Image (cartoon, rainbow, N blue to C red):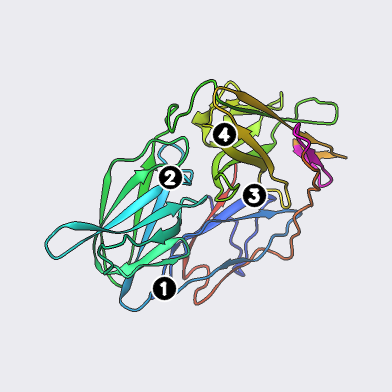
Amino acid sequence: FNAKGVVKEDGNLDLKNGDYMYVEFKAPAGYMVNNQHVKFSVSNGVAPDIQVFNTKFPEGKGQLIITSIDKKTGAPVAGSVLDLYKKNASGTYIRVASFNSDNSGLLMSSFAQTGEDDSANLEIINGTVALSSGSYMVQESSAGSGYATNKGAYYVKVDKGTTQKVDVGHDRSSNVSGQKSDTGVKIRVVNTNNSGISNQEIAVYSVDDNWKNEQVIFVGKTGTDGYFDTTKATTGSDLLNNSVLEIKPGKYYYKLNNISGAKNHYFTVTDGKIGNQVLKLSTTSTTGNSSSTKSTSTTSNNAKTSSLAKTGMKSTAIFSAIGVSLMAGGVILYRKK
């Protein structure tokens, strides 16, 4: 991101209309890095305030940031199970906790392993882990949907008051977790005349048997025929083959991505079958290739309609932080292409 002309003399940001994301990469002294990625939009020259909140290091602890990412694109990988080991006095690495990665590739939860070393004294803070000083190792026991498990071992030394980071990279695999070329779903976005609508960004999520514990597995845009375009997928691109998402049997839902109030459309994938989902949008006007503020969505499964409201913006974008200004801390701002 080119900051030239973006940060004004008064410290405010001058951003063009579009979609953005910001993340902190350096925190003030004595504080943990807030590695959460926050998305926002600029419309008609206004945007929400940008705020970065920092947490002080817990007494005697350091910070370890573990992220699960796609090796090729750097996109977050959800649903990974990551094991953390601590080196004991005899030089043996003992597992102290396991973590699940969320939709941002950050740590979602942890659970101590019964009967094993608990000296790490772990805390999950903003998707990262605060822990006692020592030598640690990170290994993955299973990867998110559509990815091959990373068999590598990542060694890191953590000291109190410091931040260390481990990125667990993943390769895509066309035959992961029982996926088959004859199993999956085709999703199409159309208008009221059943003609395909292009450049509609759709996110697809997997869920458990109770329709909970969602994990994003695919994000992409439609082509002129209304089906997913393989060149416009930002997450899970290797799952897409000739407009078909080749995903394993199970429960899922999809929705218009980055649209406030967008409805979840649920479906089930059956072994040996390719299902069809149709999302019908009714728009009163268009801006470029994007649907306007008044839209409704339906599917071939008779899902209820939902209104898509225009995102409300309240002020000129300003960086504000607890205990740190924009220049004193470290924040990276990305513009979504």
Q: Earlier in the sequence, mark 3 or mark 2?
A: 3
- Mark 3 vs mark 1: in front: 1
Q: Amino acid at mark 2?
A: Ile
Q: Amino acid at mark 3?
A: Asp
In-image side of 131 versus 180 (left or right): left
Q: Amino acid at mark 4?
A: Ala
Q: Residue at x 42, y 62 (%)?
A: 128
**Badge 4 element:** strand
Q: Amino acid at mark 1?
A: Tyr
The residue carrying pointer 2 sits among few (fewer than 14), some (14 to 19) or many (20 or more) residues within 10 Å by Cα, namely many
The residue carrying pointer 3 sits among few (fewer than 14), some (14 to 19) or many (20 or more) residues within 10 Å by Cα, namely some
Q: Residue at x 82, y 43 (%)?
A: 295
State the CA–CA distance, disc 2 to disc 1: 25 Å
Mark 3 and mark 2 residues within 8 Å of each other at the beta carbon: no
In-image side of 187 versus 280 (left or right): left
Q: Which residue is mark 2?
A: 69
Is residue 131 placed above or below 224 in the rendered structure? below
Q: Which residue is mark 1?
A: 31
Is residue 13 placed above or below 54 in the rendered structure? above
Question: Residue 278: image x %, image y %?
Answer: 73, 30
**Badge 1 element:** loop
In-image side of 54 versus 50 (left or right): left
State the CA–CA distance, disc 3 to disc 2: 21 Å
What number is the disc on residue 19? 3
Q: Earlier in the sequence, mark 4 or mark 3?
A: 3
- Range of magenta residues: 290-302
Question: Residue 228: image x %, image y %?
Answer: 63, 29
Q: Which residue is mark 4?
A: 233
